[in-house]
Image (cartoon, rainbow, N blue to C red):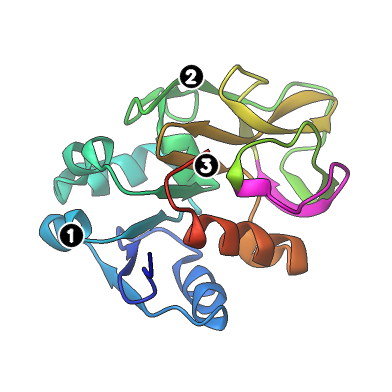
């Protein structure tokens, strides 16, 4: 199935949108950026980027009605960084209720580690079509102060004082705590895998 003409990036005022768009376009895909519920529902692929503060980001989603749209999508959806965190049930950041796509809680990184976690770190325990051709130990780029602890929905972990969920999956929903658009060839491969995924395991 060729979905190169209907890749949607959600616009809700969060950071990193344009770097994600550029990364997808470099792979040869046509990208639309929109906050329209109707256009998002009609997309073949949806990318949910995010850099910022959880509570203000959720307020922007609610203002646009996207808090109701996103959990009901049946096409492949990829949340990146804050986007992944907002797909969870709740975040410690601002005591913020999330979208509930992943029944998980987002916690502040523990005392005793440098916050934010910035820079390159290794992935481990890779599974799911998102990481086809990506070996354990691959380096990717992180920038975050909150995290999802290691959980059953994790399809990749990373060690920063303790293992945490570097990527999540539930049905057609994927999330990356790391930034694939800033992770060189490995991140390009993750994006390519997501954009080419045909819905099968």
Extreme residue toward the left, this view:
38
Pointer 3 residue: 175
Residue 27 image-quadrant placement: bottom right
Mark 3 vs mark 2: give the one in front: 3
Viewer-nearest residue: 47 or 58: 47
| Numbered circle sitting on residue 32 | none
- The residue identified by callout 1 is 42
Q: Is residue 116 above or below residue 152?
A: below
Residue 45: say if magenta.
no
Residue 45: % across, % down: 36, 58
Residue that appears at 46% across and 49% down: 78
On the image, the x and y values in percent for residue 182 come to 68, 65
Judged from the image, the secondary structure of the residue bearing numbered disc 1 is loop
Classify residue 118 as left or right of residue 9. Answer: right
Residue matched to label 2 = 104
Q: Could you tell me residue 84's position as x and y percent?
A: 49, 40
Give me the C-alpha separation between circle 2 and circle 1.
28 Å
- Asked if residue 67 lies left or right of residue 18, the reply is left
- Is residue 131 covered in magenta? yes
User: Which mark lies nearer to you, 1 or 3?
Assistant: 1
Dot 2: within a 10 Å radius of its alpha carbon, few (fewer than 14), some, or many (20 or more) residues? Answer: many
Quick one: SS at disc 2? strand
Q: Which residues are magenta?
A: 130-144
Closer to us: 42 or 20: 42
- The numbered mark, 1 or 3, whose residue comes first in the sequence reads 1
């Amino acid at each position: 199935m060729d979905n190169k003409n209907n890749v949607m990036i959600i616009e809700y005022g969060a950071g990193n949108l344009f770097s994600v768009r550029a990364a997808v376009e470099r792979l040869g895909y046509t990208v639309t950026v929109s906050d329209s519920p109707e256009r998002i529902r009609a997309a073949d692929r949806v990318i949910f980027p995010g850099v910022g503060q959880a509570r203000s980001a959720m307020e922007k989603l609610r203002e646009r009605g996207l808090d109701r749209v996103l959990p009901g999508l049946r096409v492949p959806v990829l949340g990146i960084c804050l986007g992944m965190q907002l797909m969870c049930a709740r975040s410690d950041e601002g005591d913020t209720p999330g979208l509930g796509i992943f029944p998980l809680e987002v916690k502040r990184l523990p005392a005793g580690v440098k916050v934010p976690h910035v820079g390159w770190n290794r992935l481990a325990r890779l599974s799911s079509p998102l990481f086809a051709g990506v070996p354990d130990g691959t380096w990717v780029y992180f920038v975050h102060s909150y995290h999802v602890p290691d959980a059953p929905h994790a399809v990749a972990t990373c060690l920063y004082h303790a293992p945490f969920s570097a990527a999540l999956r539930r049905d057609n929903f994927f999330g990356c705590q790391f930034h694939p658009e800033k992770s060189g060839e490995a991140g390009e491969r993750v994006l390519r895998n997501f954009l080419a995924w045909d819905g099968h395991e």
